[in-house]
């Protein structure tokens, strides 16, 4: 299979699925409030753009802020863990506890502590909790996986701890950090959506709130249009982080050098 055709294959498959969906719904006369056809969802996306796009902006802001906060805090804490095994032994279990605690269980508490008048801050905290651990886990693994021979070489040449960190550990951990970022990017979006579902407040009118509102009003085409925007946002986040990974690793890391060509 040629390269261009292989790249177009997902889009072609998607068009076939949409065509089958459209035809099946119309032939079976499925009510719109059960399953609207794709053409009606597209019409709703255009007609309700004035409602959906501001909500998309809210969700994007919370997701990006939570992701950046997770990257900064996760990498910083991983560096501290690499400097002190005692600190890592003391704090890592609490990071695990934070990760395994369902966000739906702690969301009401966070909303109460922060206050309904600052619901955006509560959503940011909840999204950060979901997105934080993959960065911390991968960065910690990467920083501790440095080739011991290279570490000895740096020590032999009298490199300082800062030089060893900046010139050896960070580059060695970069593929791990980028892998954690690709997981964390999607989780930040999921965390923002779940947090808004749980918070259940119209004061934070992101896409999750529009889905709830549309369901309550039986505006199912608009509900599907909001879901479509969420899916496109998730794809955009993954594509952007994949592009960043290729740009940073393409000249030196095995994962981006000489990709295998499938026949």
Image (cartoon, helix red, strand yellow):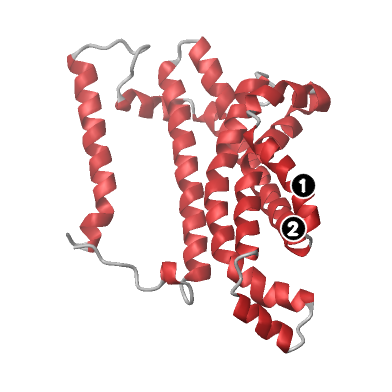
The percent coordinates of residue 39 (x first, y second) are 30, 27
Q: Are marks 1 and 2 in contact (CB under 8 Å)?
A: yes
User: Front-most of 185 and 145?
Assistant: 145
The numbered mark at residue 201 is none
The numbered mark at residue 91 is 1
Q: Is residue 114 left or right of residue 36?
A: right
Crowd around label 1: few <14 · some 14–19 · many ≥20 (10 Å): few
Residue for point 49% across, 14% down: 215
Residue 190: quarter of image = top right
Q: Is residue 224 left or right of residue 112?
A: left
Residue 113: quarter of image = top right
Residue 2: quarter of image = bottom left
The percent coordinates of residue 50 (x first, y second) are 54, 29
Residue 205 is at least partly visible in this image: no
The quadrant of the picture occupied by the C terminus is bottom left
The quadrant of the picture occupied by the N terminus is bottom left
Which is more N-terminal, label 2 or label 1? 2
Residue 52 is at least partly visible in this image: yes
Task: Find disc 2 in the rendering and name its residue.
Answer: 81
């Amino acid at each position: 299979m040629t390269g261009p055709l292989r790249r177009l294959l997902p889009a072609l498959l998607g068009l076939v699925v949409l065509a089958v969906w459209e035809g099946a719904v119309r032939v079976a006369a499925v009510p719109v409030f059960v399953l609207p056809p794709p053409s009606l969802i597209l019409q709703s996306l255009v007609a309700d753009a004035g409602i959906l796009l501001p909500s998309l902006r809210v969700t994007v802001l919370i997701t990006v802020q939570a992701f950046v906060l997770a990257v900064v805090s996760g990498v910083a804490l991983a560096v501290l863990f690499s400097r002190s095994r005692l600190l890592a032994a003391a704090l890592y279990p609490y990071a695990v506890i934070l990760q395994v605690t369902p966000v739906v269980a702690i969301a009401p508490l966070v909303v109460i502590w922060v206050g309904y008048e600052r619901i955006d801050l509560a959503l940011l905290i909840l999204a950060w909790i979901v997105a934080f651990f993959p960065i911390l886990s991968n960065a910690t693994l990467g920083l501790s996986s440095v080739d011991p021979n290279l570490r000895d070489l740096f020590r032999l040449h009298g490199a300082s701890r800062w030089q060893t960190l900046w010139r050896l550990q960070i580059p060695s951990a970069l593929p791990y950090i980028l892998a954690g970022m690709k997981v964390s990017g999607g989780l930040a979006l999921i965390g923002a959506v779940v947090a808004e579902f749980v918070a259940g407040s119209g004061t934070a009118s992101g896409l999750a709130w529009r889905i709830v509102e549309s369901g309550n009003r039986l505006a199912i085409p608009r509900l599907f249009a909001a879901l479509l925007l969420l899916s496109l946002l998730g794809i955009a986040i993954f594509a952007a982080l994949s592009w960043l990974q290729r740009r940073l690793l393409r000249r030196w890391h095995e994962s981006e050098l000489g990709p295998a060509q499938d026949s």
